[in-house]
């Protein structure tokens, strides 16, 4: 249960749209895996869908490379593209990572917002 006026008003309403967008992107594990791949594994900003699918299939239990590739191409890469994280060329199956300029800042702000709110069990 939340205390205070959190139910009545949004916390940091001026940041809500950007924060909501970031949380939506990060809400699915395959999108997080794509970001993780480019941020922590790959030394360059370009990879193929096959490279991503192979890497992700090794890390995500119960998903084979073909299923990962299918989900990436039909759902997750288009969403990451429409939100400016990647450029996905459907003709060549190449993915260029762009990152998100304010992702780190938004995540820090989100952590701050959540820590400011009193919780009760």
Image: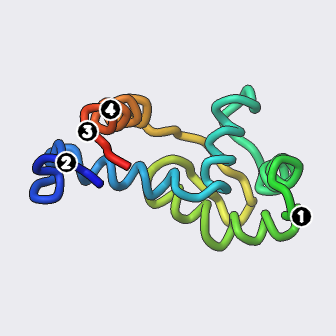
Question: Residue at 21% across / 44% down in the picture?
Answer: 15
Q: Which residue is mark 2?
A: 3
| Residue 74 in the image, given as x and y percentages of width and height | 65, 73
Mark in front: 4 vs 1: 4
Question: Residue at 67% across / 50% down in the picture?
Answer: 95
Q: Which residue is mark 4?
A: 115
In the image, is 114 to the left or to the right of 6?
Answer: right
Mark in front: 3 vs 1: 3
Could you say which disc has been placed on residue 64 in the image? 1
Q: Which residue is mark 3?
A: 117
Q: Quadrant of residue 100?
A: top left
Which comes before the other along the chain, label 4 or label 2? 2
Spatial separation of the CA atoms under disc 4 and disc 1: 38 Å
As helix, strand or loop, the secondary structure at mark 1 comes to loop
Which comes before the other along the chain, label 4 or label 1? 1
Which comes before the other along the chain, label 3 or label 1? 1
Q: Is residue 61 above or below residue 97?
A: below
Q: Quadrant of residue 30?
A: bottom right
In the image, is 92 to the left or to the right of 104?
Answer: right
CB contact under 8 Å: marks 2 and 1: no
Q: Quadrant of residue 7?
A: bottom left
Question: Residue at 42% across / 52% down in the picture?
Answer: 23
Question: Residue at 75% across / 44% down in the picture?
Answer: 47
- 10 Å neighbourhood of mark 2: few (<14), some, or many (≥20)? few
- 10 Å neighbourhood of mark 4: few (<14), some, or many (≥20)? few
Spatial separation of the CA atoms under disc 3 and disc 1: 40 Å
As helix, strand or loop, the secondary structure at mark 2 comes to loop
CB contact under 8 Å: marks 4 and 3: yes
CB contact under 8 Å: marks 3 and 1: no
Spatial separation of the CA atoms under disc 2 and disc 3: 8 Å
């Amino acid at each position: 249960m939340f205390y205070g006026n959190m139910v009545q008003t949004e916390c940091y309403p001026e940041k809500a749209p950007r924060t909501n967008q970031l949380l939506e992107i990060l809400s699915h594990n395959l999108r997080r895996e794509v970001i993780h791949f480019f941020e922590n594994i790959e030394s360059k900003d370009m990879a193929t869908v096959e490279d991503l699918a192979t890497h992700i299939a090794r890390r995500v239990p119960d998903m084979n490379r073909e299923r990962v590739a299918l989900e990436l191409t039909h759902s997750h890469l288009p969403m990451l593209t429409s939100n400016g994280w990647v450029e996905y060329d459907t003709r060549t199956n190449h993915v260029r990572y762009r990152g998100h300029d304010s992702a780190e800042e938004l995540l820090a702000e989100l952590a701050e917002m959540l820590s400011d709110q009193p919780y009760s069990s």
